[in-house]
Amino acid sequence: GSRTNIPFTTTTCTQSETTNGMDVNDYQISSSYLRQIRFKNNTVTFNLAEDFRKDYHNKKALRSIKVATGPKKITEIILYNDSYFGDPTSAYQVDSRLKLDSISISSHSKKYRFTYDRPDQVPSRGSKSVDFWGYYNGKNNSTLIPKTEESQGFSFNLSGADRSVNPETSSIGTLTKIQYPTGGFTTYQYGANKLTT
């Protein structure tokens, strides 16, 4: 077999905080982005947006994917992800998440459009208001450690998080509809996870 070097784009962010004239946190974050995959006579190229994302410091969103199969067959998928999940008025990065609104393929002006369930109510990335499967449950939890009252025959009370499933909130932010360029569409309905003993 042969080895191929895979090209990456690397960005570096250095940040420091100063408290009472002293540097208390000094750290550097580096990120690598896959730019291209080459195999046989084919290539897949990943292109980033020009502007930085609002939800991550010094990060850029994927703007398009170009697939070349042979010398003359090129397909480009353009991603339109200019809006965000979460509170649109918040100034905090953790309160928003980049959202894929639509895509177009090659030179077609028509788009595949995506609709989500209550996108403005998606919680912060660090929210502890989640059920056992990680879906938002709307509970006011300050920890992820679940409330426990009994374990293996021993009776004790450990106050903790309510990790129960809430079908009213667990679908927040999920994909509910894809509308096709032809005018047709597919809708999605989700059911809550169940645990049987």
Image (spheres, rainbow, N blue to C red):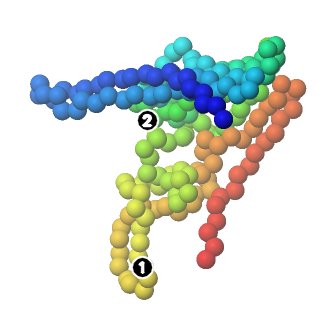
Q: Nearer the viewer, residue 125 or 37?
A: 37
The 10 Å Cα crowd at callout 2, few under 14, some 14 to 19, many 20 or more, is some
Q: Residue at x 56, y 26 (%)?
A: 5
Secondary structure beneath dot 2 equals helix
Secondary structure beneath dot 1 equals strand
Q: Which mark is residue 94?
A: 2
Quarter of the image where the C terminus is located? bottom right
Residue 119 figure quarter:
top right
Amino acid carrying label 1: it is: Glu
Amino acid carrying label 2: it is: Val
Direction from residue 86 to residue 112 in the image, left or right: right
Coordinates of residue 180 in the picture (x, y in percent): 82, 29
For mark 1, what is the residue?
150
Coordinates of residue 52 in the picture (x, y in percent): 48, 19
Q: Nearer the viewer, residue 105 or 99?
A: 105
Coordinates of residue 137 in the picture (x, y in percent): 53, 54
Q: Among all residues in the image, which is located at the extreme front?
A: 1
